Amino acid sequence: MEAKALFSAIKKMRASDQILEKIRQTILSGKFGVEERLPSERELAEQFGVNRGTVREALKILEESG
């Protein structure tokens, strides 16, 4: 008898990908106005608890994706 899997494997996400998704969701939800700027890299890094390079990578991907 073969056991049916109840769960699928989890995928680990890089911190920059997690930040990218959170920023994207915040923008799409309308929490930022059309002309409103995002917080600075330094502020975002502090809020997310990561270094500025990680935030910079997320913002670069966001910018490239439009």
Image: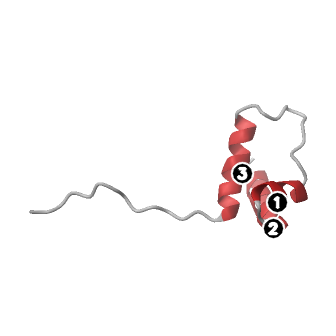
Q: Secondary structure at mark 3?
A: helix
Question: What amino acid type should be assigned to the residue bearing mark 3?
Answer: Ser
Q: Position of residue 62 (x, y in %)?
A: 75, 52
Disc 2/disc 3 C-alpha distance (Å):
22 Å
Q: Is residue 24 above or below residue 8?
A: above
Q: Position of residue 21 (x, y in %)?
A: 66, 50
Q: Secondary structure at mark 1?
A: helix
Q: Are marks 2 and 3 in contact (CB under 8 Å)?
A: no
Question: What amino acid type should be assigned to the residue bearing mark 1?
Answer: Ala
Q: Is residue 30 above or below residue 7?
A: above
| 1 or 3: tag closer to the N-terminus | 1
Q: Are marks 1 and 2 in contact (CB under 8 Å)?
A: yes
Write down the quadrant of residue 3 in the picture: bottom left
Q: Is residue 32 above or below residue 21?
A: above
Write down the quadrant of residue 60 in the picture: bottom right
Q: Of all residues shown, which one is farthest toward the left?
A: 1
Q: Which residue has dot 1 on it?
A: 45
Crowding at label 2, few (<14), some or many (≥20) Cα neighbours within 10 Å? few
Q: Secondary structure at mark 2?
A: loop
Disc 1/disc 3 C-alpha distance (Å):
21 Å
Q: Position of residue 61 (x, y in %)?
A: 74, 58
Question: What amino acid type should be assigned to the residue bearing mark 2?
Answer: Asn
Disc 1/disc 2 C-alpha distance (Å):
5 Å
Q: Which residue has dot 2 on it?
A: 51
Q: Residue at x 70, y 33 (%)?
A: 29
Q: Position of residue 55 (x, y in %)?
A: 79, 61
Q: Which residue has dot 3 on it?
A: 65
Q: Residue at x 66, y 59 (%)?
A: 17
Q: Residue at x 75, y 59 (%)?
A: 58
